[in-house]
Amino acid sequence: QCIIEAKRAADMKLKLARTFYGWWAWDEKTNTWDWDNEIMTVFYKWLQRMKDGGVTVALNTGWCSPGDINSTSWNGKSPFTVEGDWEQSKKNYGDWVSETVKQLIIKRGFTNIKIFVMFTEPQHKSGVLDEKSAYECWLEGVKAAHNALVRDGLRDKIKLMGPNEGSTITSEMLHWAAEHAKDYIDIYLVDLKYMDNNLAMRYSKA
């Protein structure tokens, strides 16, 4: 079934496949990372099928913001969390984003991975961080990813896309992100069906 799916994607000349991507290399029992475990090995097969079919891949590196960094979300307990230490939790997240580039793109050659999507509907804050707004939590997660990639000389290997705001009419977070995240986000992402025509035209070429 997976092979059939990949063939159809190639036959229809699909340009971009976006997929969820979690901390699947994390072994909670040993508190170590294993980039060759069973689920990652299966994921590599999917990435290879997409590459063979000429399909660019966008990975969702984080879903719940800030829950996937500093607490427990529907994805489970975050391996990045250091209780009571948001700064270290962010650093751990950024390190994982950078390590993803090293492990998937550099080491294993999945150069069809071009984009990291920075969370989903981050205007609806998910996670325990009472002192910061949803927008601030999202931006600090984006900065952590950006800074780690810059530190490791990998920033040119990947595009960061966001804010991926959803279920809104006015897309207020997009306006905010365009002002505050312009040094970190490469591609603005929003559901255009919720946008008014003027706003859609303004960001359609971003």
Image (cartoon, rainbow, N blue to C red):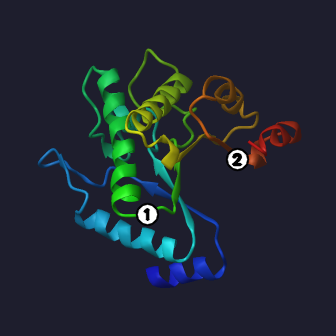
Q: Nearer the viewer, residue 20 or 156?
A: 156
Q: Which is more toward the observer, 17 or 114?
A: 114
The residue located at (33%, 55%) in the rendering is: 103
Identity of the amino acid at label 2?
Asp
| Residue at figure coordinates x 51%, y 30% from the top left | 138
Q: Tell me the number on the disc at residue 191.
A: 2
On the rendered structure, is 4 left or right of 43? right
**The N terminus lies in quadrant:** bottom left
Q: Camera-side residue: 86 or 49? A: 49
For residue 96, which quarter of the picture? Answer: top left
Element type where label 1 sits in the image: loop
- Left or right: where 142 falls relative to 8: left
Q: Amino acid at mark 1?
A: Phe
Q: Nearer the viewer, residue 196 or 204?
A: 204
Residue denoted by label 1: 110
Q: Position of residue 69 (x, y in %)?
A: 37, 34
User: Which residue appears farthest toward the top when viewing the image?
Assistant: 131
* Quarter of the image where the C terminus is located: top right
Residue beneath the point at 38% across and 45% down: 74
The mark lying in front, picked from 1 and 2, is 1
Above or below, 127 relative to 11:
above
Q: Residue at x 49, y 33 (%)?
A: 142
Q: Position of residue 24 (x, y in %)?
A: 30, 55
Tell me, yes or no, if residue 175 can be seen here: yes
State which quadrant residue 91 falls in. top left
Circles 1, 2 touching at the beta carbon (< 8 Å): no
Place of residue 127 in the rendered image (x, y in percent of width and height, measured from the top left): 40, 31
